Image (tube, rainbow, N blue to C red):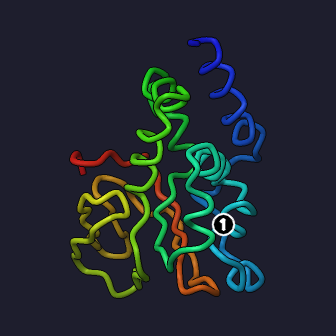
Amino acid sequence: MKTTSILALAAILAGGAILAPSTGGAPELTRQQQAKGVMATLEGEPELTTFTRLIHLSGMAETLRTGGPYTIIAPNDAAFRTMPGADMDLLLEPENRDLLAQRLSYHIIPGTIDLKNVSTEDRTTLQGSRVVLHREGKTVWVGRGEIVKQGAELGDGGSIHAINMVLEPDQE
């Protein structure tokens, strides 16, 4: 079972490992991506491949396609590479799909948030816990993580923003 988790983790991270060096986050969303829904845009973001693959693995893709709008604070691929291997192994075990979905849904906030106007806000995530968004100068923080690229609003009213860490419920 451990070998399966390691192989699954390697397959998930392989998409991020062959990317060109990052310039500090996910690329700007194009007008075409803005007109798409959340899942279609996530699937086209080269710096968010691990998050997107985990969304599919957890079974949450359909929720994102049919629900919303959502503000997604997606850890970039570099953020997932800093996670301890044992934590990722635990999340990848087939019997822990609910735990994976809970962890990912902590990065999803129902509704639309205009980050340009955030000073300090307390929001409830799709997972049910609360998270604090806070601005310091031009930098927006979500818990202890920094938003490294603010995305544009999508056609369905949602938005996707790249963050530099994987957030943990009740620790942010």
Q: Identify whether 65 is placed above or below 146.
A: below
The quarter in which the N terminus is drawn is: top right
Q: In the image, what residue occupies the spot 22% across and 76% down?
A: 120
- Residue appearing at x 37%, y 69% in the figure: 139
For residue 137, say whether it is visible. Answer: yes
Q: Position of residue 137 (x, y in %)?
A: 31, 75
Q: Say if 89 sits above or below 30 in the image.
A: above
**Is 26 drawn above or below residue 95 in the view shown?**
below
Which amino acid, by three-letter code, is at mark 1? Met
Using a 10 Å C-alpha cutoff, classify the residue at mark 1 as few (fewer than 14 neighbours), some (14 to 19) or many (20 or more): some
Residue at (23% x, 62% y) in the render: 130
Q: Is residue 68 left or right of residue 145?
A: right
Secondary structure under tag 1 reads helix
- Residue at 53% from the left image edge and 74% from the top image edge: 67
**Residue at which label 1 appears:** 39
Q: Is residue 102 left or right of residue 17?
A: left
Quadrant in which residue 124 is drawn = bottom left
Visible residue check, residue 77: no
Q: Nearer the viewer, residue 65 or 78?
A: 65
Identify the image quadrant of residue 107. Answer: bottom left
- Residue 88 lies, in percent from the top left, at 49, 29
Give the x, y percent position of residue 39.
66, 66
| Horizontal and vertical percent position of residue 157 | 54, 86
Q: Quadrant of residue 109?
A: bottom left
Q: Would you say 132 lies left or right of 60 here?
A: left
